[in-house]
Amino acid sequence: METKKPVRRSQAWFGKNDRDGFVHRSWIKNQGYPHDELDGRPVIGICNTWSELTPCNGHFRELAEFVKRGVYEAGGFPLEFPVMSLGETQLRPTAMLFRNLASMDVEESIRGNPIDGVVLLMGCDKTTPALLMGAASCNLPTIGLSGGPMLNGKFRGQDIGSGTGVWKMSEMVRAGEMTQEDFTAAESCMHRSKGNCMTMGTASTMASMVEALGMSLPENAAIPAADTRRNRLAQLTGRRIVDMVKDDLTMTKILTRQAFENAIRTNAAIGGSTNAVIHLLAIAGRIGIDLKLGDFDDLGRQVPCLLDLQPSGKFLMEDFFYAGGLPAVLREIQHLLHLEAPTVNGKTIGENIAAAPCWNREVIRPLDQPFMADAGIAVVKGNLAPDGAVIKPSAASAHLLKHRGRAVVFETIEQFHATIDDENLDIDEHCIMVLKNCGPRGYPGMAEVGNMPLPPKVLRKGITDMVRISDARMSGTAYGTVVLHTSPEAAAGGPLALVQNGDMIELDVPARTLRLEVSDEELARRKALWKPLEAPKRGWQKLYVEHVQQAHLGADLDFLVGASGAGIPRDSH
Ligand code: FES
Ligand code: MG
C-alpha cells in the first residue's frame, strides 16, 4: 500500500507546478540544490543572530553548519537565515530598545517563508528572548540552541568573570586600589574565547531558562562555546527538529504554564538575572500563558540558590558545566518542579534529569547545604512602586535588605554621571540613591544602569554597597542592593518621578514593601507640577515609546502581545 506523505507548509511554496512554483523553486536552486531537495521533506529554518557586532554570537555561522549536518542526517532540508542581532556591549542606547523589533523580524521572517520547523540560534542577552518571542507568535515546531559561554576569564593567576569583574575592578580604580594600566591589561584576559558572558549574567540565565522551559536539548545552558560538545549538541539539535516537524511538536505544546513555573524556580536556584523576569513575562504574553510579576515572588520564595557562581558567588560557567550543568541543579530541586512537563526531545523534564550526575559539590551545592537560602527574586510594592519593583536578594547585602534612608535623587543618568564624583555631593552610605527616567519609555529602552556606581567618598571608607532604586534594569552580571524595574516608571508619571532630595524611603524586602514617606496630599501637589519628557519624533523610537508596556508586564509592545500563528500568507506574484 502506498503511504501518503504529509503535506508540509513549505509545499505551499515548493509543491506547486504553476508559475509560482517555478519561481519559488528556481531561485532556491541558484544555490545548487537538486530538485529532490524540494520534494516535501521538512524545511528547517535556522534563525541566526550571527554578527561581528554581537561578539558573543560571532561563532554562530560555524555552529549553524553543525545544525545543518544534523538536519541533513535526519532527512530534512536546512535553510539558514539572518535576523537582527543585538549585541549587549556595542549597541546603544541599549540592546533592550530593540528586543521587540528583533522579535518582529523573527516572527515575520518565519511566517513569510517556506519553513516547517525552526532552530533558534541564541546567545547574547537579548537575542534569546527576541527569538523566543518572535517564534512563539508563529508557533511552528521550534527548538532552541544557545551559543554557550566563554571559557573562564584568567588574569594574573585569578579567574575573572564577564561584567562582574569589570564592575569590581572599575570601583577599585575609583577607590585608588588598582592602576589604570592593570585595568587595561585585564581587558585581553577577561574575554579570551568565543561564547557569551561566562558569569551567571543574563545570557547564561536565559540559556538556562531555555533549558528549564524544555525548549532545548538537555545541557544546553552550560557547555562552553569552545568545547566541541557544543558542536555535537548543535548537530543533535538539527537531527531532533526534523522529528519535531514530523510529530508536529509546536511551541504551545512545550511552553505551558507548568514550563514557566519550572523556569521561575530554576532562576531562583541558579541565582539568575533579574532580566529573566521581564523576558519570561514577554514570552508568556506571546504564547498566551497568564504569567504575572507576582508569580516570580510566589514561586521563587523559599527556593534556595544552589550555585556558587558570579555575580552572587565565585565560580564561572565553565566550572558549572564540569560540575554537571543545569540538569544537576534541576535534579536537586526536582521536588519543586513539574516533572511531567514535556520538552523538545520528546521526553519529560523529569525523565531528562532523573540520572543527572553532580561532579562538584562546591559549585553546585546540595539542597540541604544551599549556597543561599530563600534566593528567589523578590517583588516589592508600595506607594513608590504601585505595580511593583524587583530586587535580587542573592546579589544584595543582607544588612541592607531592611533599610530606611534619605533620598539622593538623580533626574537623569547624565545628571548622575555629572555629579556622583563631586566631593561636595550631600551623600553618605546610609542614603538611598534614586535614579529616574531610565524605564522603558524614559531611556527609551530601559537601560542597564540601575546598579549605579557609589560615590568615591563612600568607596574610600571601604563600603561597597548602598541601597539604589530606579526604573532601570541592571546587567545580570551586576550585584548590590539594587531595586529595579520600578513600575510605573518615572517617564510614565509614576511616583518615582515625584521623589525629591531629602525624602525618606523605607525598603523592607522581608515584608516586600517599598515606601516613600511623603503624604498623598504632597505627592498630589508634586504630580500637578510634573512635566513629561519630550517624546521621540520619528522612527522606531517613536513607535516604541508610544506602544511599550511597563516593566511589570514584560515591556513588550502592546500590539505584539499574542500570536498570529503560521498560516500561509498570500502569494507574492
Ligand atoms: Fe553578550 Fe554578555 S555581552 S552575553
Ligand atoms: Mg547585560
Image (cartoon, rainbow, N blue to C red):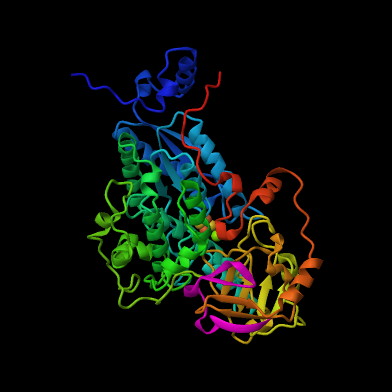
Q: What is the magenta range? A: 379-406
Q: Is residue 405 left or right of residue 298?
A: right
Q: Quadrant of the C terminus?
A: top right
Q: Is residue 482 left or right of residue 67?
A: right
Image region (quadrant) for ligand 2? bottom right
Q: Is residue 404 magenta?
A: yes
Residue 250, percent across and down?
A: 38, 41
Q: Is residue 247 left or right of residue 207?
A: left
Q: Quadrant of the N terminus?
A: top left
Question: Looking at the picture, does residue 348 appear above or below residue 250?
Answer: below
Residue positioned most to the left: 1
**In the foreground, 294 or 146:** 294
Residue 47, percent across and down?
A: 47, 40
> Which residue is at 71% across, 61% downward?
491
> Which residue is at 34% across, 61% downward?
326
Residue 185, percent across and down?
A: 56, 67
